[in-house]
Image: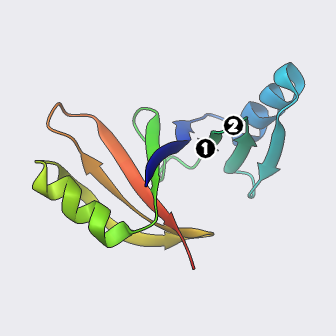
Amino acid sequence: MYEIDFVEFPSASATASGQFFERAFGWAVTPYGPDYTDVRTTGVTLGFQADAAEQPRAPLVTIRTDDLVAARGAVTAAGGVVTTEPFSFPGGRRFHFREPGGSELAVWCPEE
């Protein structure tokens, strides 16, 4: 299974980004400290990263899978380049890759 369920955005203020989407659209907001906020919509979660050292250069589309190892293999077999090896974060593990056209995306798997 592969499905897009998360998009991470760079933000000057994760708190302000979260408050905006909560006020404008009534979406649920979960702050993870001053530098990161999740905003839940129907089907897709938006993440806002204010830590300059962790920010993506552009929105980072994240694909959910049940098997991170198989997904990594499929990405490289199809010509993708892994740019960040798998790492743990609260709730799962993920890796980043660049597809042949140059866009960076990520694949994640919930922790069992």
The image's mark for residue 50 is 1
Q: Image check: 28 left or right of 40? A: right
Residue shown at the point (24%, 55%) measured from the top left: 83
The image's mark for residue 78 is none
Does 49 appear above or below 33? above
Between discs 1 and 2, the one toward the N terminus: 2
Residue shown at the point (81%, 43%) measured from the top left: 29
| Callouts 1 and 2 close, C-beta under 8 Å | yes
Question: Which quadrant would the N terminus be assigned to in this image?
Answer: bottom left
The image position of residue 59, as x and y in percent, is 46, 33
Q: In this view, which residue lies farthest toward the bottom? A: 112
Question: Which quadrant would the C terminus be assigned to in this image?
Answer: bottom right
Residue shown at the point (74%, 52%) measured from the top left: 34
From the viewer's side, name the closer residue of 104 and 36: 104
Residue type at tag 2: Ser
Does 60 appear above or below 24? below
Does 44 appear above or below 32? above
Residue type at tag 1: Ala
Local secondary structure at mark 2: loop
How far apart marks 1 and 2 lie (CA) works out to 5 Å
From the viewer's side, name the closer residue of 34 and 21: 21
The image position of residue 58, as x and y in percent, is 42, 32
The image's mark for residue 13 is 2
Q: Quadrant of the rendered structure where residue 48 is?
A: top right
Q: Image check: 68 left or right of 15? A: left
Crowd band around label 1 with a 10 angstrom C-alpha radius: few (<14), some (14–19), many (20+) = many
Residue shown at the point (88%, 28%) measured from the top left: 26
Q: How is the image coloured?
A: rainbow
Q: In this view, which residue lies farthest toward the front? A: 1
Q: In this view, which residue lies farthest toward the top? A: 24
Q: Image check: 2 left or right of 85? A: right
The image position of residue 109, as x and y in percent, is 48, 65
